Amino acid sequence: MVVPAGNELTYLVLLAHRADPNYLAGDWTFGAGFQEFAVWLTVFGPVIQLLGIEALGWIGRITTWVASGALLMLVGRRLGAKTLAAALGLILWLGLDQSMGVGATQIIAGFQARSVSYVFLLAALLAALSQRISWAMLAAGLAFAFHPGVGLWASGPLVLAILTMRETRNQGWRWLAIAVLAALPGAIPQILALGDAGLTKNETDFIAFDRLPHHVDPLVFGQRGPLLLALMVGFNLAFCWLRRTDFAYRLLGIFQTVALVPVLVGLVARAFEWTWFLVLIPFRVLPAIVPALFMLNLAVVATNRAWSELWPRRSQPAALRVSAATGAAAIAGVLVLWNPVAELATDAATNLRIANRAPSDIETVLRWASVETPTDSLLLGPPNIDELFYLSERSQYVSWEALPYDRIPEWRSRLASVMPPDFRYRRSNLWEEEFGRLPMERVLALDPRVDYVITTADYTFPALFSSGDWVLYQVTPP
């Protein structure tokens, strides 16, 4: 594994820039917006100045991984699972890629605002299951503050479940203000950002179907993931109903039912192309929470040696038959359609290969640029390359990965100025090839004018450095 990677290449770089404006000085992408991460930026800005991107990335990863794993283990223990059974279940959950590709969401992932938010969410869930309502409300509010997306689709359902349960209703209302106050530092910037964005239907369509289909478009989630998720939801809810005399299971049943509502609305929104709703990413949380709880429920079954509950019989009550049928089908589906053990082995081999691979040609050129070009330079490279900011340590003309919600029209205009008019952003694997066909005249016409361009094109600009097919050209005079 390497740090930073994936989303960290955007969010840790954003954090470093906001903490030190001289880093990526004058960058258009990170210079404004991203208000949804206001709390995360404020809390960890001083830390990244002290530790640097790599150290904070590693410390943040390990801390949030350990915290999330420990909290899920404690949830399993609260439900009645033995530690070993819960641990085995969670390892298999990791082998399911946590969400089985539905919504491309993960609880245990790179260090970013979302990973911190999930720690608070799981802490809130554990506290609620233990009827420690004041702590549950505080943690739920902090989960919202660090990442309003997680808060909206997970903290909200959990708070509603607490307010619904007769055992916790009075305490829930008493401590509701704590949740609201804790959430406000993240909620207010998010609300203001949504109001300022004023996205049009064309813009939300572009975000949903071109930029974020892996998060919001059920048509690209595949078939096996949604099928397994549906079976797991059915099993979890039936399992909770069977154990409804236990407060913890009743709470989990209500929590998952309420959290399921935005997912179902999201399916309707996709059918009618209500992209204003889809860009809120309603599939963000449930697809990762449900498989984790499914594995913990199986751990409870294993602990109690109650395997007969997974074999439907006519003599059983209806709820038990539903639980048995969906549970058995989900287990069979996991083994046949996914095989989490094989997936874990594949992921380990992939991470090992990535960690040991030699730098690519474009990475070599970007690292050279970080040393040999002025720190206030503006660089143009293929917008889809995740490492542009991090490796070059220079401002970029435009990035596909970093999505500035508050400036979507200008962002799309910048993309259009360096890519072909009919370029299929969503499906194309030809980013570098098409970018390499950008005429020199269009490079010179860019506003603002770039200082350097990294490309495979053959330009007459002065070539400063090359590696393989990639060349760093100087566009402006020295």
Image: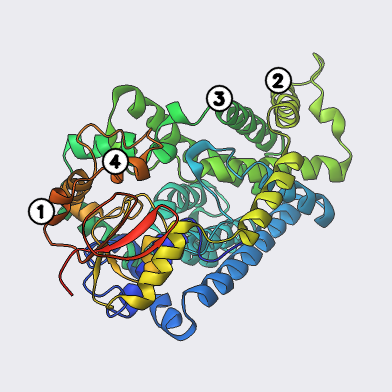
Residue shown at 48%/39% (left/top)?
A: 103
Q: In the image, residue 279 lies at what x, y percent?
A: 32, 41
Residue shown at 27%/30% (left/top)?
A: 274
From mark 4 to mark 3, how far is it between C-alphas? Answer: 23 Å
First of labels 4, 3 by sequence position: 4
The mark closer to the camera, 1 or 2, is 1
Element type where label 3 sits in the image: loop
How many marks overall? Answer: 4
Residues packed near mark 2 inside 10 Å, few (<14), some (14 to 19) or many (20 plus): some
Q: Quadrant of residue 416?
A: top left
Q: In the visual, does 225 lie left or right of 420?
A: right
Q: Mark 4 is on which residue type?
A: Ile
The mark closer to the camera, 1 or 4, is 1
Q: Which residue is mark 4?
A: 207
Q: Which residue is mark 3?
A: 223
| Residue 441 in view here | yes
Q: Mark 1 is on which residue type?
A: Ala
Q: Is residue 328 above or below residue 38?
A: above
Q: In the image, residue 97 lies at what x, y percent?
A: 62, 44
Asked whether the beta carbons under mark 2 and mark 3 sit within 8 Å of each other, the answer is: no
Element type where label 1 sits in the image: loop
The mark closer to the camera, 2 or 3, is 3
First of labels 1, 2 by sequence position: 2
Q: Which residue is mark 1?
A: 445
Q: In the image, residue 41 lies at what x, y percent?
A: 36, 71
Asked whether the beta carbons under mark 3 and mark 1 sit within 8 Å of each other, the answer is: no
